[in-house]
Amino acid sequence: MIGRRPTEKGLVLIAVVFALTAMTGLVLVLHAKMLSSMRTVDALAMSAKAFSCAQAGLEVAKALSWQDGPRSWPLQVSLVLGEARCSLEISDEQGRFNLNTILGPDGAVDQQRLGQLKRLIGLAGIDDKGLADRIAAWLARQRQAGKGKVSSMDEVLTMDVEDRQVLYRLLPYLTVHGDGLIDLNAAPALVLQACLDDQDLAARIIAKRASRPFGDVAELRNLGLDEMATSRLEGLFAVRSQAGWLRVRAAGQVGQVRRWICAIIHANPSTGAADVISYWQQCVW
């Protein structure tokens, strides 16, 4: 028996079903793209709010840089701006080991300072492999090239090392700003231990400043040091009424989106403002 050919109406129905199916698929694709675009816009909006919160934290740090009087560091500050939350950590840059002190005024390596850097690297859990000597050699090349002292942490980050993560691990303990004297109230435990080569004395300093910040280096005599030992440490440590250089790490968060910035700022009496010396977005240290 010969089958009947589809009627004209049947062909139209098939065409309509096919068109509806195609349109449904197109609508679903467009809907998915629209949802994706909306999520992208929301994420961008949250990122902008989180970044603005981090920037607000930096402004707070700039205002705090003018406060006088010895303080215990670091300072922790929390802010809430609408739906954004900002956490802020401020530390005194001059509590860190100053790389510029490794070379003397004549450009020769100060072996005592180099030894302190070697101990600091070891205390930070880094296998030295001559790292301290390579840092000293790099500083000497900078000096010989007529660049003088290193003036920015950005310069330190250009140092040629085998493993850049090693530098990032050291950065919390290093600086190039200030006069080279380490603030007793601000120095991290590892910096104190490395410079003093005396873990017990470092612990006593930390315990003392936790109850009341040092007002003067001479107060080290209250920890059992004689006058001669205290006098020697006056060439290494200081106590300042104003921080001068501050290191700031500010993080802003909205929902699951987090943005952070790092900066080094300086309270500049000549301008009456806090200058931003260095600035990093999404910093790794």
Image (cartoon, helix red, strand yellow):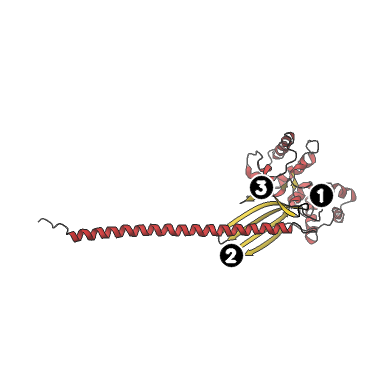
Indicate left or right for 108 with 250 as reference. Answer: right
Outermost residue toward the front in this view: 271
Marks 1/2: CA–CA distance: 43 Å
Callout 2 secondary element: loop
Front one among 259 and 181: 259
Q: Determine contact: label 1, label 3, CB under 8 Å.
A: no
| Residue 29 visible to an observer of this rendering | yes
- Residue at image mark 3: 169
Give the quadrant of residue 107. top right
Q: Mark 1 vs mark 3: which is more N-terminal?
A: 3
Residue 237 badge: 1
x, y (%) of residue 55? 64, 57
For disc 2, the neighbor class at 10 Å (few under 14, some 14 to 19, many from 20) is few
**Quarter of the view holding residue 204:** bottom right
Residue 109 position by quadrant: top right
What SS does tag 1 mark? strand
**First reached walking from the N terminus: tag 2 or tag 3:** 2
| Residue 197 appears in the rendering | no
Sequence-wise, the earlier of marks 1 and 2 is 2
Please tell me which residue is depicted at 90% across the width and 50% down the height of the picture.
227
Residue 78 vertical placement versus 120 (above, below): below
Residue highlighted by disc 2: 83
In the rendered view, does 204 fall on the left or right side of 10? Answer: right
Q: Are marks 1 and 2 in contact (CB under 8 Å)?
A: no
Residue type highlighted by circle 1: Phe
Q: Position of residue 148 (x, y in %)?
A: 75, 38
Image coordinates of residue 81 in percent, x first then y, are: 62, 64
User: What amino acid is found at the position of numbered circle 3 in the picture?
Assistant: Arg
